[in-house]
Image (cartoon, rainbow, N blue to C red):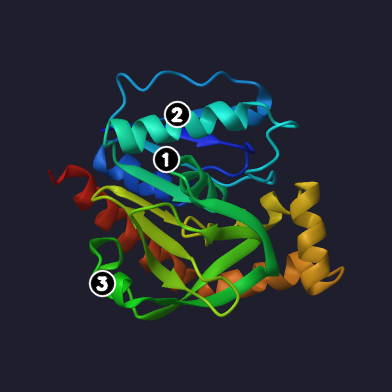
Amino acid sequence: MKILVLQHARVEHPGSLRDFLREDGHSWHPVELDEGEALPGLDGYDALWVLGGPMDVWQESEFGWLRSEKELIREAVEVRGMPFLGLCLGHQLLAEALGGKCGKAEQSEVGVMDVSLTGEGEHSLFFDGVAETFKCLQWHGAEVTEMPPGAVALATSEACAVQAMSWGPRAFSAQFHVEVEADTVSNWAAIPDYADALRAAFGENGVQQLSEACAGAMPEFNRIAERVYLNWLHAAVRS
């Protein structure tokens, strides 16, 4: 499988999922939109992944490529039926590309927090083998406020109703992060907007506190990442 990966910050890459792709012999081609790289066509790719970033989905005047990125996502998912995975910003972009809405969250989520599966999520292939409630890394101040027509909420939390969703048989997205590695927090904290959110949540010692929290949860993070990756892969190849 050859996967097109849209990135919005060079350090916000597929993370631990890269190991699984490499082990299975899949290739992935990153496009760094925030650095001015052009969106390619979808021909020649088997799937589309869209990752996180510090910008918001509605900042099209400041980040002009957001509009064309949403159009590409819609073409991939709605028109071509390509397998799709969206994380954080990618989750929100999927919602908007298909007719949903996003906005500022009433309560930002930054830290290692619990997410719970909905009834639909418990029966979804995407979360097969994942506990009903599990810990994950959250780092967002925006959220999906209205799912697109046909979408199904798969996971939720007290502060964010749509923590994960599916659209059709092969498009899945999550507001939280599954791709966490040992250096994720320190790398992302170098992004000013992320650093501000971390400081607001934890104070000046936020990098150390969140790094330690992630280190303690890393075995669970790794298990969930592998399970979700395998589940996504199984969904991607089904007709």
**Foreground residue among 95 and 22:** 95
Dot 3 or dot 2: first in sequence order is 2
Q: Quadrant of the C terminus?
A: top left
SS state under label 1:
strand
Residue drawn at point x = 49 percent, y = 66 percent: 162
Q: Is residue 59 above or below residue 37?
A: below
Quarter location, residue 165: bottom left
Q: Quick one: which residue is furthest to the left in this view?
A: 239
The reply, left or right, for residue 114 in relation to residue 139 is left
Q: Label 2: which residue?
A: 72
The residue at which mark 3 appears reads as 129
Q: Nearer the viewer, residue 123 or 208?
A: 123
Q: Which of marks 3 and 2 is in front?
A: 2
Choose between 104 and 141: the one closer to the eye. 104
Which quarter of the image is occupied by the N terminus? top left
| Label 3 with label 1: CB-CB less than 8 Å | no
Which of the labelled discs sits on residue 139, or is there none?
none
Expressed as whole percent of the image width and height from the top left, the position of residue 43 reads: 31, 19
Instruction: Name which residue type carries label 2.
Output: Leu
Judged from the image, the secondary structure of the residue bearing numbered disc 3 is loop
Residue type at mark 1 is Trp
Distance between the alpha carbons at the discs numbered 2 and 1: 11 Å
Q: Is residue 158 above or below residue 201?
A: below
Q: In this view, does 42 lie to the left or right of 30?
A: left
Report, in whole angstroms, how far the alpha carbon at label 3 lies from the one at label 1: 22 Å
The amino acid type of the residue labelled 3 equals Gly
| Distance of label 3 from label 2 (alpha carbons) | 31 Å
The residue pinned by badge 1 equals 49
In the picture, measured across the screen, residue 100 lies left or right of residue 227, that is right
Label 1 crowd bin: few (<14), some (14–19), many (20+), radius 10 Å: many
